[in-house]
Amino acid sequence: MIGKLTGTLTDKHPPEVIIDCHGVGYEVQVPMSTFYHLPALGQPVSLLTHFVVREDAQLLYGFATLQERHTFRQLIKVSGVGPRTALSILSGLSADDLAQAVSLQEVGRLVKVPGIGKKTAERLLLELKGKLGDALTANLPLQASTAERADILQALLALGYNDKEASAALKALPADVGVSEGIKLALKALAK
């Protein structure tokens, strides 16, 4: 029903913002990934939205990109995952990182998100497989072995690097690199 809001940002209190659209203030719940990219108060803002009607409430969820909204909509289709949990997931992982975790079937990345246990993470991986687009083809060279990239990524995460650092180091690797050489090169890049 309401697919997009454009107006003036009048209030920001995570995870809620208020957007004034010609005198009507809409309360919108946003993931932290969207919240961090919002303009200052009093500035114009435009968010894509997802409208939820429940017996006890009517809620608007806002997103900066089409990919975020698509990911949110896929998440809430998973049994046991409601809008609040979906926002939490998108606040803990970007849409790209989530798609990559699903492509590589990485339970460990999902259980790091507050409120996501091992069973929920496994259900998410199972039910989202193939529904978020292929993050690997978007983020990694096509010639690279997916299994080798997954091993390198897991090694970097095990060494204590966060998802963003590990993914950035992975993108910089040559396409035909092996696991051990890839880990060495990634560690050199991360040491800079």
Image (tube, rainbow, N blue to C red):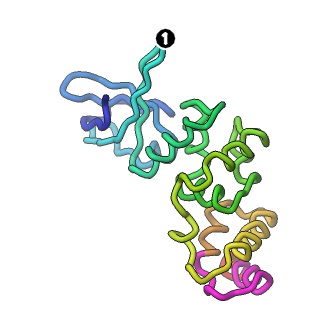
Tag 1 residue:
56
Residue located at (41% from left, 42% from top): 63
161 and 98: which is toward the camera? 98
Amino acid on which the number 1 mark rests in the picture: Asp
Q: Residue furthest left?
A: 22
55 is higher (above) or lower (below) than 15: above
Find residue 154 and report its image quarter: bottom right
Within-10-Å neighbours for mark 1: few <14, some 14–19, many 20+:
few
Residue located at (50% from left, 41% from top): 72
Q: Quadrant of the C terminus?
A: bottom right
Q: Quadrant of the N terminus?
A: top left
Percent x, y of residue 93: 60, 50
Query: How many tags in the picture?
Result: 1
Percent x, y of residue 24: 25, 22
In the image, which residues are magenta? 171-187
144 is higher (above) or lower (below) than 89: below
Residue 81: say if magenta: no
- Left or right of residue 80: residue 74: left
24 is higher (above) or lower (below) than 83: above
161 and 126: which is toward the camera? 126
- Left or right of residue 129: residue 6: left
- Left or right of residue 166: residue 21: left
Residue 172: say if magenta: yes
Percent x, y of residue 152: 74, 74
Residue located at (61% from left, 37% from top): 78
Residue located at (74% from left, 46% from top): 122
Percent x, y of residue 176: 65, 88
45 and 89: which is toward the camera? 89
